[in-house]
Amino acid sequence: MEFSKKFESIAPSPTLAIDAKFKQMKADGLNVVGFGAGEPDFDTPDHIKQAAIAAIMSGKTKYTPASGTMELKKAICEKFKRDNGLDYEPANIVVSNGAKHSLINAFGAILNPGDEVIIPAPFWVSYPEMVKYNDGVPVIIHTTEENKFKFSPKQFEEAITPKTKAVVLNSPSNPTGTVYSAEELKAIADVAVAHGIYVISDEIYEHLIYGNASHTSIASFGDDIKDLTIIINGVSKTYAMTGWRIGFTASSAKIAKMMSNVQSHTTSNPNSIAQEATIAALNGPKEGLEEMIKAFDERRKYMVERINAIDGVSCLEPEGAFYVMMNIEKLIGKTICGKVINNADDFSEVFLTEQLVAVVSGVGFDAPNFVRWSYATSKENICEGIDRLEKLLK
């Protein structure tokens, strides 16, 4: 009996695996500190919860249109106009079961077998697997820490072949915290338009920005690039709603229709109650978001300062999201607690075994000399985790 070759080729998510291991160790009574999950440690704001309760009590517990309610689609259009200066109609919007689902839909709508998708590394672990799931071929281009993990228009141009269908853009970035400037995005947009290449623009972290950085959507540089762009967004990160599972896309009406058709046969509509909560999130007060950004900013600065004060490791100061990529290049080839460190997998294993600290190896991000820390956790946890890092390296 032969199984699906496509499904057998899909690797599990290492970020979810390390989070599951951390939670199991914690349940076993171990004093483990976790920095794996990309999940705000803040609770969902009360007005959003109340909207969900009201939806339940008023009987909004039935099927909705497969691609989301008209009321929610209108709220999403207003969000794009307000936050990004983009004009979309409800026909351009598809609401799905989280941004991961939105990405699967987006790749599915544009890819045919053998089509290539350019993905800059370090990348979020799911992008290549999603491309393979949809019969595409991931083409990886590597960025450098010296260039703040950004790919250039020249790299983009050089990676294009007759089979290139799309490029993935993630700004602010998971795992690096990189934020592309408007000028950098315009140059990337020009290449995409010149070659007729789709841009899958993952903007899930758009509001988690620090310092002098600012977010610009690549779709805002004119109708030509807007027609080629599929924006991925959602409420998980901005409103601490990871478990509510609402993501959405903005694209051409043709692509939106295809995604809606497929979704009608796979998952049907996203959760009706979570849709009502999302309307409250998008239209409601933003004090909770401001409080969360302020806390993340303080933790970001503290984590960067502490890591850069330790011999053998270093990191850039991220401009967005809630991750720090720690460079362990100076530790490669050294022995720590009896184990030779050949890459970030080895380091992460030793760190977890010896000091009970769970970080995410950069191997899954195609950055084998880095590990990812999340500062979407308390400052006390960050302090304890870095204290243990110092103990490990001393």
Image (cartoon, helix red, strand yellow):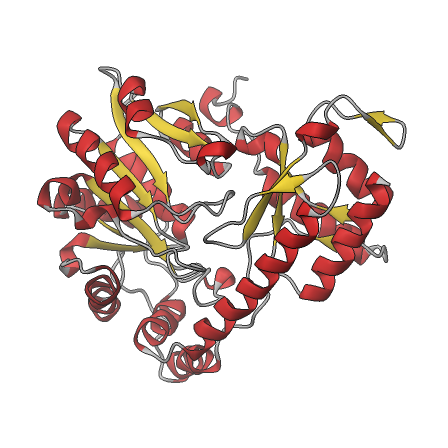
Residue 266 appears in view: no
Q: Is residue 65 above or below residue 224?
A: below
Q: Is residue 180 above or below residue 79?
A: above
In the visual, does 152 lie left or right of 364? left
Which residue occupies 68% across, 44% down? Answer: 359
Q: Residue furthest right?
A: 338
Judge from the rendering whether residue 276 lies leftward or rightward of residue 392; answer left or right.
Answer: left
- Residue 66 can be seen in this image: yes
Q: Residue 370, how many percent across, how many down?
A: 62, 34
Frontmost residue, 203 versus 101: 203
Left or right placement of residue 373 versus residue 66 in this view: right
Name the spot of residue 84 as percent of width and height, x first. Answer: 23, 59
- Relative image position of residue 321 (x, y in whole percent): 48, 54
Q: Nearer the viewer, residue 305 or 294?
A: 305
Give the residue furthest to the left: 223
Quadrant of the image containing the N terminus? top right
Q: Find residue 234 and report its image quarter.
A: bottom left
Q: Residue at x 28, y 29 (%)?
A: 153
- Decide which of 124, 324 is in the foreground and name it: 324
**Residue for point 80% across, 36% down:** 350
Q: Is residue 140 left or right of residue 316?
A: left
Q: Residue furthest top?
A: 162
